[in-house]
Structures are given as C-alpha cells and as structure tokens.
Amino acid sequence: MRSLDEINRDLASVTDALPALDGDAYAERHVLLKRQDALRVEAGRYKIDFDEERPIQDAMGELHSRWSH
C-alpha cells in the first residue's frame, strides 16, 4: 500500500496539470479527472485521527501542510 504522502504528491501533480491543459483537451482532461477521483478515493482510505480537544487552527495547519507538498 502506498503512503499518504505518495498519494498526496500524485494528487497535487494531477491538480497542477489540469489548468495547464488547452481548453479543447477534453480527452486529456477526462483522464486527469478520473485519476484525480481515484487518488481521492485512495487517500480517503486513510483515517486521520484528530483529538477533539485540539484547537482547530492546529488541525487546519496540519491539513494545509499535507496538501501543500
């Protein structure tokens, strides 16, 4: 099983590639969107446990750092 960091890197790559496509690149966009959906499902299999007492800002900072790479 791939690590969540690997999945997030792939997801970031796909997300970056989408706006770079030409407006008429429908087939390429479709492939990337399907890949993006599959990566989101794969990432969703990981459970991230958050302490309910933890401040929201701390949790949001952690999530931001995970998706910024």
Image (tube, helix red, strand yellow):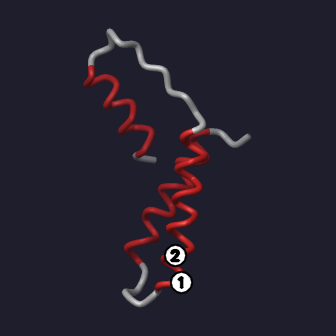
Q: Where does the image place residue 29, in percent across and percent down from the top left?
A: 48, 77
Residue 14 lies left or right of residue 53; in this view the side is: right
Q: Give the residue number, with chain letter if any, for mark 2.
A: 30
**Residue displayed at 59% across by 56% down:** 38
In the displayed structure, does residue 63 sit left or right of residue 30?
Answer: left
- Residue at left 32%, top 9%? 53
- Asked if the residue under mark 2 is in contact with the one under mark 1, i.e. CB atoms within 8 Å, the reply is yes
- Furthest-bottom residue in view? 24
Percent position of residue 28, x then y: 53, 80
User: What numbered label is drawn on residue 56?
Assistant: none
Q: Could you say where residue 56 lies in the image, as x and y percent from the top left?
A: 27, 22
Image quadrant for the N terminus?
A: top right
Q: Nearer the viewer, residue 5 or 32?
A: 32
| Coordinates of residue 42 in the picture (x, y in percent) | 61, 46
What residue is shown at x 34% (from left), y 25% (from top)? 59
Dot 2: element: helix
**How many numbered marks appear?**
2
**The one of 13 and 50 positioned closer to us in this rendering:** 50
**Mark 1 element type:** helix
Q: What amino acid type is highlighted by mark number 2? A: His
Task: Give the answer, above or below, for where 47 lies relative to 9.
Answer: above
How dense is the environment of label 1, judged by Cα within 10 Å: few (below 14), some, or many (20 and up)?
A: few
Say whether residue 26 is left or right of residue 4. left
Q: Amino acid at mark 1?
A: Ala
